Image (cartoon, rainbow, N blue to C red):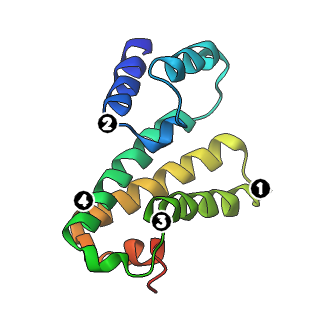
């Protein structure tokens, strides 16, 4: 499991993922490694899924530059979109942290699949960019 996690983090580092919190190469792995045994959630898995989703988002925007419209910072809009979804999940007192993480992963996967299938026609990209 550790090797798999390390390889996935290295891939995110090679792709300069915004989800590594601007940490120097290797620093993020050290942080993950030190907390791996104490982790009770799927946050790392979700971070990876968000990165895949963000990659699709960037591809769509690069092919459809007009979609950016008045969006000053599409990357920030993307991050805010998922942060707001997590805030909604966190407000539900009936779910524990693990259940919230699972629901968040399911949502991210749903967005990713929709972006892959519909591209610029995805309602999610329009929500992210505030287009409707």
Q: What is the x, y in percent for residue 23?
A: 53, 29
Q: In this view, does 63 lie above or below 35?
A: below
Seen at 59% across and 19% down, the residue is 31
Q: Residue furthest right?
A: 93
Query: Which mark's residue is nearer the viewer, 3 or 1?
Result: 3
Disc 1: which residue: 94
Q: How far apart are marks 4 and 3 (CA)?
A: 15 Å
Q: How crowded is mark 1: few (under 14 residues within 10 Å), some or many (20 or more)?
A: few
Disc 2: which residue: 15
Q: What is the x, y in percent for residue 117?
A: 22, 66
Query: Which mark's residue is nearer the viewer, 3 or 2?
Result: 3
Query: Which mark's residue is nearer the viewer, 1 or 4?
Result: 4
Disc 4: which residue: 59
Of the numbered discs 4 and 3, the one sitting upstream in the chain is: 4
Q: Distance between the residues labelled 3 and 2?
A: 19 Å
Position of residue 42 in the picture relative to residue 129 (left or right): right
Query: Which mark's residue is nearer the viewer, 4 or 3?
Result: 3
Of the numbered discs 1 and 4, the one sitting upstream in the chain is: 4
Helix, strand or loop at label 3? It is loop
């Amino acid at each position: 499991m550790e090797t798999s996690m390390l390889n996935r983090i290295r891939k995110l580092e090679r792709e300069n993922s915004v989800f590594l919190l601007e940490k120097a190469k290797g620093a993020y792995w050290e942080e993950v490694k030190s907390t791996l045994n104490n982790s009770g959630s799927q946050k790392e898995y979700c971070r990876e899924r968000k990165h895949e989703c963000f990659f699709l988002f960037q591809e769509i925007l690069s092919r459809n530059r007009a979609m950016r419209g008045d969006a000053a910072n599409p990357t920030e809009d993307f991050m805010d979109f998922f942060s707001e979804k997590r805030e909604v999940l966190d407000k539900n007192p009936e779910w524990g942290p693990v259940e919230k993480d699972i629901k968040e992963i399911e949502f991210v996967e749903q967005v990713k699949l929709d972006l892959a299938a519909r591209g610029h026609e995805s309602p999610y990209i329009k929500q992210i960019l505030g287009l409707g």
